[in-house]
Image (tube, grey):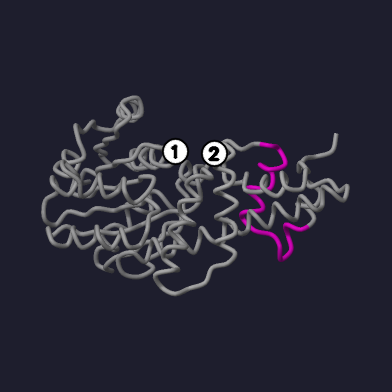
Amino acid sequence: MAAIGFVGLGIMGRPMLRNLLKAGHTVVAYGRTSAKLDSVVAEGAQRASSNADVGARASIVITMLPDGPEVEEVVLGANGILSGAKPGSLIIDMSSISPLVSQKIAAACEAKGVDFLDAPVSGGEPKAVDGTLAIMVGGKPEVFAKAEPILKCLGSSVTLTGPASAGNTTKLANQIMVACNIAAMGEALTLATRCGLNPEVVVNAVKSGLAGSAVLNAKGPMLIARNFKPGFKISLHQKDLRNALQTAEANHVFLPLTAQVQQMLSSLIADGEGDFDHSAIATFVESASHVEVKVPS
């Protein structure tokens, strides 16, 4: 197997890298935080000295970073991946970023003869750990075919959604639905709790009906247990909705629900909750209503 480069060793990146190692791939890793890099090297990854070194040593490089500016710096910056990459190699950006940034990076890669896919994911840390992420890919079909076996080491659903940047447009649609779903769940369970009901019973009563969803199954128990350990941080979801609103403005689309939930997220960040799991979106409604969703004692 050819060596796979990996840059971005955060909550999502480290378990994804581990799954590549488990599948038998040689992984060349780099990250700015030495402790995180030391950790994955101890698990079997090879240490790179820079982003450019990753590009030079691996014919396929995966990036998993917080936002567009970080991806631009790592891929296009001085001593970036593209400066070390050889023609015919492939960069797969699995970060969730603006489609406009994906298009810029795709164009820069094409100018150097390097293939590019944008392949953001959904599922949070639990699905990154067990390798069952939903992966939404943008790029050329023949490049997707080359990358698909590798992506299937990381996700149970791998879908080509269109040309470059289509993956990130699809991810924005996903993030709108997830955020609005969590906010609606928060309103529903806050109302039920205020009316004297046990929210756990309410979740169990509705989850097999039309209101049931993966969001309710995953985030409802976290809210009720007051467990906001981040699988996906509020600050990152706020970034995604900001990108969605900017994309909507550029395409003359009106997103009133997204705008309202994005403001809720901004308020939570201002209150110091940006590093909480996005299930804590529901706490905005709790706070405004002076109700805490929990099992009665």
The circle on residue 244 is none
Quadrant location of residue 136? bottom left
Q: Position of residue 203 (x, y in %)?
A: 75, 52
SS class, disc 1: loop
Q: Are marks 1 and 2 in contact (CB under 8 Å)?
A: yes
**Depth check: 294 or 289 in front?**
289
Q: In the visual, does 87 lie left or right of 21? A: left
Q: Residue at 70% x, 51% y: name it.
A: 186
Q: Residue at x 54, y 68 (%)?
A: 255
- The x and y percentages for residue 57 are 16, 41
Rendered position, 107 above or below 93: below
Is residue 290 inside the magenta stretch? no
Residue 11's mark?
Answer: 1
- Secondary structure that dominates the magenta span: helix
Q: In the rendered view of the protein, which quadrant contains the C terminus?
A: top right
Q: Relative to the observer, which residue lies in front, 84 or 89?
A: 84
In the displayed structure image, the side of residue 177 where residue 158 appears, left or right: left
Q: Amino acid at mark 1?
A: Ile
State left or right for residue 245 relative to residue 278: left
- x and y, in percent, of residue 134 in the image: 46, 56
Quadrant in which residue 148 is drawn: bottom left
Q: Residue furthest bottom?
A: 252
Q: Which residue is mark 2?
A: 230
**Tag 2's secondary structure?**
loop
Q: Amino acid at mark 2?
A: Pro
The part of the chain drawn in magenta is 206-226
Q: Residues within 10 Å of mark 1 (few under 14, many from 20)?
A: some
Residue at image x 71%, y 37%? 225
> Quick one: 223 or 137, which is closer to the camera?
223
Q: Residue at x 29, y 57 (%)?
A: 147
